Each structure stands twice: as structure tokens, then as C-alpha cells.
Image: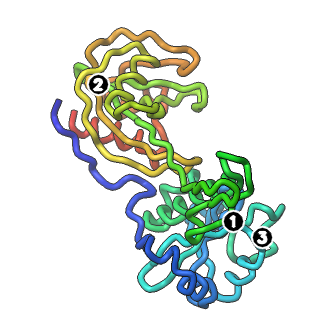
Amino acid sequence: MPLILASRPNAYTGSPLDRAGHLREDAGFIAGALAHPQTLFVPVWRARNLMRGVAEGRPEAVFLAGEVAGAVRMSGGPWAFLGLKGQQAVFAVDLSEAEDPLPLLPPDLGGFTDLRTVAGLLAPEDASILAHARGLMYWRLRHRFCGVCGTACEVRGAGHVMACPGCGAQHFPRTDPAVIMLVHRGGRALLGRSHRFAATMFSTLAGFVEPGESLEEAVAREVLEETGVRIGAVQYHSSQPWPFPASIMLGFYAEALSEDITIDTTELQDARWFTPAQLRDPDAHGFALPRLDSIARRLIEDWMAAA
């Protein structure tokens, strides 16, 4: 199988932040950064990010500083230190307890939008920061209690550790690894249509890695379970953080050893082999490809370029 390299970075990668993990336990630094007028805050409301220009098709991430940031911080929602952007500290702050967060903000700052709907239009570095904030705040809101004994946790590490005062357990942000793979054989690619997809969309196969399983084993198992196709050589392509809600997508190409498809109807509605010509003009052939910001689309486009 010829090596297929990633043609460009995936969406939500390439963060400009230095995560500066050594500063998370520096209480003096964190207190000073929270109070500094130049510190940037990335607000999140119910898994949505603050942006302006969305209706005009020119979305722009909105970061808060100064008095506006102070008002948001005083709302009392969870927050976490994301890192340093040059000399500026950057924090995420969650406003989800507010039924309507916009009264906390000046009227010209836009509104809260699902990042996935506009990621392809945002500056790549900003999209990465917004994804980082979204993922970390999702974890904070869903890990308030100890998973071992049920005691309410205390925040440590500038928002990166939930410590249990009851049993002493420490809980850290969780990211679930998932493999996503373009299966190919004889110049054709295998794509499937999940029950969750739009009516005509076909995408690469994917699934979560199970305990005690290598990434290559997960690729082979998922493809076999969903389509009955057996897998031989597996080649890594690239990865993509996918905080929708809390995954890291690990992209691969997988060489099929068989062609007959037997669909697991609990996982897929349909699965087919596609030629490069069909993939280059999906509208003409009655189907749609996955969204532009997804690693699935990148796997398909890079395979077509190499075909």
C-alpha cells in the first residue's frame, strides 16, 4: 500500500497556545493572571462558543478581556487555564448556568454558536482554541462528583484536576480514542451511511477503541463488525481532536482483503464501494461527503489525490 501523507493540518489542530502545564499549580501566577486586564477569556455556553459575524457568513471568534471579562468571571461558572498566547494568559469560562448569557455581555459581541457549523470559516488557530475550551468545559461540567465514591470534587490544577476530599482520588480530563479509517481495495473506497447521518451522506467507517486493543486491531474489528470486510495492512494518516463531546480521532487507511459487504444494521443503514470519479462528483451520483472540517473528509480527499 503506497504511503499517503496528510496534505494539510486537520481542523482544530495547530493551537497557538503554550499549555504551560507547570503553571497550573502556581497559585500566585493563576491569581495574578485572572485579575490582569490583558488576560483573555474564552466563554462557553452549553457547549457553544462566542462568535460574531455568523449570520453574515464571516464568523470570528470573540475573546474577552478587561471589564467585560471581569463581569463574566464574576458569574461564578467553572473556569480553567488553557495556556499562554505569547505573554497573555488564556482561560476558558463556562456560562451554562445562565438561561441567557447575552445580558452578561455588551450587545455587539455576537452570540453563541455550535463550533461545528462554522469551523471551516474560522481562522484555524482560533478554531483550535475554541475547541480546546469547549472540550475542557464539557469535562468540568460532567465530572463534579467522584466516580469512585460519589463525593463532590474540589477543583485543582487551575481547572485540570477534580480532587475527591472523600477518598483522595484525582480525576483528569478524559479524551476517548476513536479510530476512523478509509478502507480501500482495487482502486475503490468503502464508505458507510450511519443512522445519524443526513439522508444522502456517506463517510469513512469509525469506532471507539476498546480496552486492551491496539489501534490497528480496532480498525480491523470495527470494519469487520460493521461491513463484514476483512482488513490487511493498516497505515496511519493523522489525528484530529474532536471535542463533540470528548474524542481524539485517529485516522488510518486500511487495505481490504475482501469485497463482499454484510451490513450490521444496528450500526449502518448502507455501505458501498466508491470509485475516485464518483467521489470527485458526489452530487452527480446522488450522495454527499462528510463535512469539510472532519478528518473523514481529509482521508477521502488525500486518497483521491493519490489515486
Q: Residues within 10 Å of mark 2 (few under 14, many from 20)?
A: many
- Residue that extends furthest to the front in the rendered view of this protein: 167
Query: From the viewer's perspective, is residue 303 above or below residue 222?
Result: below
- Where in the figure is residue 293, as x and y percent of width and height? 46, 49
Quarter of the view holding residue 179: top left
Question: Helix, strand or loop at disc 1?
Answer: strand
Q: How crowded is mark 3: few (under 14 residues within 10 Å), some or many (20 or more)?
A: some
Tell me, for residue 94, which label it has, or none: 1
Could you tell me which residue is drawn at 54 percent across and 56 percent down?
172
Tell me, for residue 102, which label it has, or none: 3
The colour scheme used here is rainbow
Task: Measure the C-alpha gap from mark 1 to mark 3.
Answer: 13 Å
**Nearer to us in this view, 86 or 50:** 86
- Where in the figure is residue 234, as x and y percent of width and height? 26, 30
Task: Measure the C-alpha gap from mark 2 to mark 1.
Answer: 43 Å
**Nearer to us in this view, 166 or 248:** 166
Question: Helix, strand or loop at disc 3?
Answer: helix
Left or right: where does residue 134 sit relative to residue 182? right
Left or right: where does residue 71 sit relative to residue 225? right
Question: CB of mark 2 within 8 Å of CB of mark 1?
Answer: no
**Nearer to us in this view, 53 or 50:** 50
- Residue that extends furthest to the left in the rendered view of this protein: 2
Left or right: where does residue 113 sit relative to residue 118? right
Quarter of the view holding residue 232: top left
Which residue was labeled with disc 2?
Answer: 184
Quarter of the view holding residue 51: bottom right
